[in-house]
Image (cartoon, grey):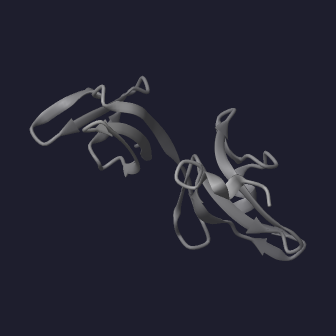
Amino acid sequence: MDTKFRVWCEFEVKGEMVSCMESEASWFLLTQTGQLMEYGPMRPPHRLSGAYKKAIPLFFAGLLDKNGKEIYKGDVVSWSDGWNNYKSSIIFENGAFRESRFKNPLEEICHYWDNGKYIECEVIGNIYENPELLKKG
């Protein structure tokens, strides 16, 4: 089974720092040992260049939000239980994807019945591009 991921990158271009979220189709691959490598047209896989200050692989949780958007580690999701609204980031811990606020299994906040109400989460951003989403208030 293939592992689906995207990559949060911070790198230097002509002396300026640039940050972006890249899909795995953007010339990244992950080795069996977990090493992130880059490749390109007519270029075999090789270690990331020194220009990369950060390159963090963020794995697909295997679930979709209520709009059909894929959920990845580091995403910020929101949901309601009918009484309260919540938002939290997605983490991978002890071999399972969970949401960070209450440590619930991710499947539990995305798809379950609670007192007759269907709870569905929605991806509203991620911790890298939208850190303000997790601030209180």
Classify 62 as above or below 91. Answer: below
Q: Return the residue found at the far left.
A: 42
Apparent side of residue 71 relative to residue 41 in the rendered image (left or right): right
Direction front: furthest residue? 15
Q: Relative to residue 70, is residue 20 depicted above or below?
A: above
The one nearer the camera, 88 or 19, is 19
- Give how far across and how far down residue 100 sits, in percent: 74, 46
User: Residue at point 22% right, 36% down?
Assistant: 39
- Residue 20 pos. (x, y %): 40, 49
Along the line of sight, which residue is nearer the eye, 70 or 17?
A: 17
Q: Position of residue 25 (x, y in %)?
A: 30, 50
Residue at the (83%, 69%) spot, across then down: 81
- The correct choice, above or below, for 70 with respect to 116 in the image is above
Quadrant where the C terminus is found in the figure: bottom right
In the image, residue 133 lies at what x, y percent? 66, 58
The answer to whether residue 26 shows anywhere in this view is yes
Which is more toward the observer, 14 or 96?
14
At a point 44% along the width and 45% down the height, the residue shown is: 5
Pick the quarter of the image with the N terminus.
top left
The quarter holding residue 130 reads: bottom right
Question: Is residue 1 shown to the viewer in this render?
Answer: no
**Count of numbered circles in the view:** 0
Residue at 81% from the left image edge and 69% from the top image edge: 113
